[in-house]
Image (cartoon, rainbow, N blue to C red):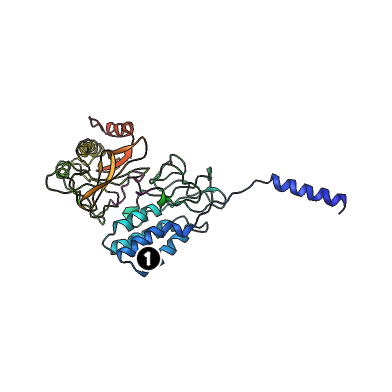
Amino acid sequence: MTRTNVLFLLSAALMASAAPLEKRIAQTIADSTTAWVAACTAAGGAGQCSTISQTAFTTLLAAGGNCDQQNAADSMIDLAKTLNNDPDMINLAQIFVQQPRNAPDSLQVPYCQTAPRNAELNGLFHCQFASSDFTKFSGDQTGNLPLGLSAVSPPGSCPALNTPVPDGVQLNTLVTSPGTPEGGSAAGDSSSAPAANSTSNSSASAAAAVAPSTSTTSATVDNAGTRAAPATGASTVSAPANPAVSSTAAVDSSSGSASGFQLQNGEDAIQLNSQFASLTATSSCTDGQQACVGGGFAQCVGGTFQITQCAGGTQCFALPLVNKPGTSVTCTSQADATARIAATGATGSA
């Protein structure tokens, strides 16, 4: 080999080493729907489960369209609704729609700009993988924010998890709840969704939430947040037929004005937090219903509350919705809960 050839090869090697390295962030996509298939099979979905699952997990590939993942989650919920509104299937579909998608260029993956068919997916959007470049997005830069939002904070997070997802990890191994939808849109809020907590009058709604003899509560928890209707010691609150869907204790403002329902939301949140405080692990409940008990998320299984504590530094609180009448229950800090309630004009502690 001549000296010229050696210099040429050395030069080429140096140029290659100087070139920016582009990390491919991928995952075992089939793992993203394994739990959903199991829930679907248990609910009686039979062969439909695998078919819908395969369509769903392929949407996580880089070639998938911005709304393909959401469309697949809609199909997962469509099937669940034919199987007695199976709560596990719906809950896992809500988590699936927030699973990060593959990022071959290490850039953030754009968000869908179309509303979902099912209200259970309202306000939910995918997390990003942790190694993504949080200053840039792939594609034509038309989906850099989730539908209806002006920011994602912190970058890379999603309603189910307040941090990006570690590279290649499945979101359903990190959380058990879809969290609190962003943008003031409550997952499950629609006339087609179960609505056992709704009445035509806000005062009547609050009273019904604590009426003796009604059984149970409603909430959902994980690292990012939860939603629910409340309960009191021996008697608890009516909960939606679908416990896994983040529910709201819907109330209608008599004035219909934004300030009217926001104040009422704040007052209802204060009352609900007081009711939650009286619940214990031995409070009566109805299977599938949920509540905050001892600061943690509780789900009724076999007539007994099974309690999961919130992430460190947070606990369950009833919070006022911002853009519509109603309340939600979420894992957050005491300071955040107090500030949100105070912002409505309501007076009282969280």
Task: State the image coordinates of residue 6 (x, y, percent, origin top left).
Answer: 83, 50
Residue at 19% across / 38% down in the picture?
Answer: 278
Between 337 and 309, the one lying in front of the other is: 309
- Count of number-bearing discs: 1
In the image, residue 180 above or below residue 42: above
Q: Label 1 sits on what residue type?
A: Cys
Q: Is residue 144 left or right of residue 35?
A: right
Identity of the residue drawn at 24% across and 30% down: 349
Residue at mark 1:
49
Q: Camera-side residue: 321 or 167?
A: 167
Magenta stretch holds residue 177: yes
Q: Magenta span covers which residues?
A: 175-188
Residue 232 is situated, as x and y percent measured from the top left of the image, at 17, 41
Dot 1 falls on a residue whose secondary structure is helix
Main secondary structure of the magenta stretch: loop
Crowding near the residue tagged with mark 1, few <14, some 14–19, many ≥20 C-alpha atoms within 10 Å: many
